[in-house]
Each structure stands twice: as structure tokens, then as C-alpha cells.
Image (cartoon, rainbow, N blue to C red):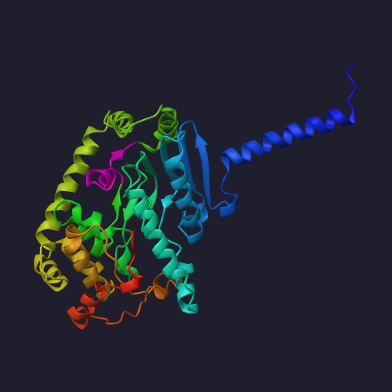
Amino acid sequence: MKTITPRLIFISYRLRSACRLQRIQGHMMSTKAGSEVLFEKVGNAGVITLNRPKALNALNLTMIRHIYPQLKKWDKDSETDLVIIKGAGEKAFCAGGDIRAVSEAGKAGDSLTQDLFREEYILNNTIGTYQKPYVALIDGITMGGGVGLSVHGRFRVATEKTLFAMPATGIGLFPDVGGGYFLSRLQGKLGLFLALTGFRLKGRDVQRVGVATHFVQSDKIVSLEKDLADLKTPSNSDVAQLLDSYQEQVCDGVCIHVCVCRTDHILLLFYCFRLFSAGSVEEIMENLKKDGSAFALKQTETLAKMSPPSLKLTFRQIQEGNNYREKTVRFFPSLLAVLIDKDQSPKWKPSILSGVSEQAVEECFSSLGERDLKL
């Protein structure tokens, strides 16, 4: 029988400790971020996991300040061939930004608000110009900040659980994170409709309108992630081919459902083009009231709840969206009543569309001088 000496016990302990340390370093490089965002290498892929499931993976400044340098590091790493980003839990990819923290910082006069938006937009631009394949698995709620983390990447994979929206006008903001750029490039007047109303797209429609590049069943996401990580030095075309193969699997046995959804999609495009083709928000409201359809009445009711300044600012933003890639605008931080107190009784200033002057809108698009964001 082999004698167990203190030295053998010490060596065994050191080996176990070394293995444990290696696992932690290899799979949980996120301790500095308080585990709110996790980084790991799986095969040839760098994987980012937004890890705030109880907060629907809402994006905060700490997470931004860890994701940005990690993307830069992987971009230069010869052993990292692509990046995958996903959300923890079963409900959300990322439901937006941490608005509570932003609102509280604003009330306290803290610089967090400016810092968060400035650094978030720099991160969005980094994703939009990333040289390696970037795959966002938007399996669940994807709004606001989550849109910024996904829509600018080359590949966006939606599932039947995906719920996409840019509900900014309901909280006194405008569709930021590059919203003016990508929404203005959707079919017809769909982008303007989504921007003004905060309408929620679900499932296959997220891919059908072009927000997502692919659609995959949710129960195939784990398998897809593994196959992506196993790709050897993949090009964008290699990744696209793999995603295409997964999307093709969805078509089996769902033809009738797809036809119904496609019909609904065509009707939505028709209504958006007919009712939202106008020279101002006021004209859109007139179109909706004259139409009188159930769709029009619903949108009239929705727009009546939105911030008038945000509606006019957003209209101008989408109108100009095709003419620029990025543009810095000021915003109206009327967040407290809707998201913090949750009393659904925001006090908009001005409270009616006619109270928002063209000069006020124009000022929002003027240069901020030295404070302009330079990317």
C-alpha cells in the first residue's frame, strides 16, 4: 500500500488548485466585471455572455468597459477566428440599457449618463467595423442597448423567442445606438413606424424585415454555437453558409404558418407605407385618423402616449438617416415617470406636438463642438 505523505497531499492540492485556476482563467475572465459579463474561448470562438438574467441582461457602463477592450484583444488574437455574443437565461438577449442607473446619475449631476452613452456608441461602432465574423444570438427580448450590441454586427440570429423593439419615444428619448442609420434602411416606411411607435416585432418577422440576418429554432441554438466554434479559420462566407444550413431546417413542416406570417408582414408593410408616408408627425396623425382602420386607431392611441419632442426628433432622425452614418444629437431625459416610478404618467414638456418648434428640433442636430463624438 502506498504511503500518503504530507508532500503527496501538498502536490495533489497544488495540482487541483492549478487545474481550478486554469478553468477559471479559461472560462470566466469576467471576475473584474463582477460576473455581469462573461468571456470565454470555445474552440476558435471568443464568446461573450451578458450575465444579468434577473435584469434581462440590461447593459451598464461596467459591462461596456469590459466588452470593448475584450473585442479589441480578440481582433488581434490569431487564435480567435470569430466572436459570438449571447444573453444568459431564457428570457432576453439584452432588454436595453440600465436606465435606472442613468436616471439616478442624471438627478445627482453625475457624469455617468454622458460616459455611458459616449462609450456605448463607441462600442457600437467597434461592432459595426469589426473585421472578424461577429454573430449575435438574439434569442429573447432585444431592445435598446441590446439592439446596439447586435444589429451592427455582420450576423444576427433570431429565434421564435425573439422580441425586437426600439421603444425610445415612450421614455422621452430617440432611437439611439445607431437607430437613425439602420431603421431608415428598412423597407418602405417600416423603420419610421417602428421608431415612432415602439412596435414589437416577434420571431420570424425580425428576420423577414432585415433586423436579423437569419432565423433558427431556439432549441437549435446550443448546437449552432458549437458548430460555429468548431469552424476552422472561418471566413464570413463560411459562417453565412453554416447559418443558412440551420435556417433551412426551419422550413420543414411549417409551410402554412410561414404563409400566414408572410401575409401579415405584407399587410404591415402596406399599412406603414400608406399611413406613414408624410412630411411631418402631424400629417401622420391625420392619416391615421382619416383611415379609421383597427390598425390606424391602435397606432393613434399609441402615438398619443409618446413624448411629443421625442416624436418630432425621431421623425427628423429617420428622415435624415440615409444621409449619414453617425450623427450626435442631444436627447430629452424624461425617464423617471415611465421606468423608475412606473406610474405611466409622464409629464412631457411640451405636452403636445404643436408645442415643439422646428427650431427646437434643429438645435438637437446642431454640433456639440468639442463634445461631438469622434469615432
**Residue 259 appears in the figure:** yes
- Left or right of 256, for residue 225: right
Residue at left offset 44%, top offset 28%: 230
Magenta span contains residue 213: yes
Can you tell which quarter of the image residue 364 is in? bottom left
Q: Quadrant of the N terminus?
A: top right
Q: Where is residue 45, by image quadrant?
A: top left
Residue 127 rendering spot, x and y as whole percentages: 36, 49
Residue 331 in view (yes/no): no
Residue ID at (28%, 52%):
201
* Extreme residue in the top direction: 1
Q: Nearer the viewer, residue 109 or 71?
A: 71
Q: How many marks?
A: 0
Looking at the figure, which quarter contains the C terminus?
Answer: bottom left
Is 264 or 12 nearer to us in this picture? 12
Check if residue 111 falls in the magenta segment: no
The image shows residue 317 at horizontal and vertical percentages of 22, 65
Residue at left 24%, top 60%?
Answer: 180
Q: Hey, which quadrant is residue 34 in on the image? A: bottom right
Frontmost residue, 117 versus 223: 117
Up the image or down, 363 lies above or below 270; here it is below
Using the image, determine if residue 35 lies above or below residue 243: below
Q: Is residue 37 above or below residue 222?
A: below
Q: Position of residue 239 (x, y in %)?
A: 33, 32
Q: Which residues are magenta?
A: 203-216
Residue 361, image x and y in percent?
A: 22, 76
